Image: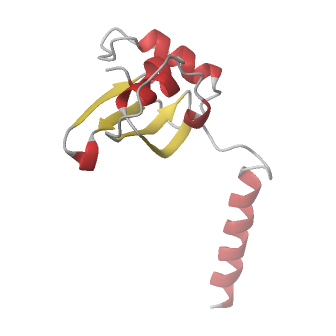
């Protein structure tokens, strides 16, 4: 029994030595970012997968502009530069989400509700225009 314990300890130490302390994990495979938009009380929903850089099969109508906006925000969807323009104050909430992998970095599910679609567009620019 003692031999097994010693072998297990040696195996753990060997595995620990294989990955240097403080080494960054390998990048995640780039499967794209799933973007969704849903209306009031999730009455309707639409979504698209965005790849950055865009590929020939991307379905986002302005994938280049959306990727540029996400790059400008350094991948932080809460800091998108947007496209400021005047909006009315009607209340017809719109919820957007983003999750996936962008440039090897995992984007945990990001979600935000805007008072209406115009304010969503003004705040997020081309990213959720699909």
Q: Position of residue 118 (x, y in %)?
A: 39, 25
111 above or below 15? Answer: above
Q: Position of residue 97 (x, y in %)?
A: 41, 40
Q: Residue furthest bottom?
A: 1
- Nearer the observer, 73 or 40: 40
Residue at image location 61% in from the left, 39% down from the top: 26
Which quarter of the rendered picture does the N terminus lie within? bottom right
Residue at image location 40% in from the left, 24% down from the top: 50
The image quarter containing residue 74 is: top right
So how many labels did they put on this image? 0
Which quarter of the rendered picture does the C terminus lie within? top left
Q: Residue furthest front?
A: 89
The image quarter containing residue 11 is: bottom right
Residue at image location 43% in from the left, 30% down from the top: 120
Q: Residue furthest left?
A: 43
- Nearer the observer, 93 or 37: 93
- Observer able to see residue 31: no
The image quarter containing residue 111 is: top left
- Nearer the observer, 115 or 100: 115
Q: Position of residue 90 (x, y in %)?
A: 35, 35
- Observer able to see residue 109: yes
Q: Position of residue 38 (x, y in %)?
A: 29, 39
Q: Is 43 displayed left or right of 26 in the figure?
A: left
58 above or below 19? Answer: above
């Amino acid at each position: 029994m003692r031999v097994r314990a010693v072998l297990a300890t040696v195996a753990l130490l060997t595995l620990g030595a294989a990955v240097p302390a403080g080494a960054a994990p390998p990048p995640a495979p780039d499967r794209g970012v799933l973007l969704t938009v849903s209306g009031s009380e999730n009455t309707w929903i639409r979504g698209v997968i965005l790849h950055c850089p865009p590929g020939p099969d991307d379905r986002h109508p302005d994938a280049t502009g959306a990727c540029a906006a996400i790059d400008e925000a350094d991948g932080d969807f809460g800091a998108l530069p947007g496209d400021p323009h005047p909006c009315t104050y009607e209340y017809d909430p719109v919820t957007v989400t983003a999750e996936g992998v962008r440039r090897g970095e995992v984007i945990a599910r990001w979600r935000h509700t805007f008072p209406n679609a115009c304010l969503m567009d003004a705040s997020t620019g081309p990213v959720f225009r699909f």
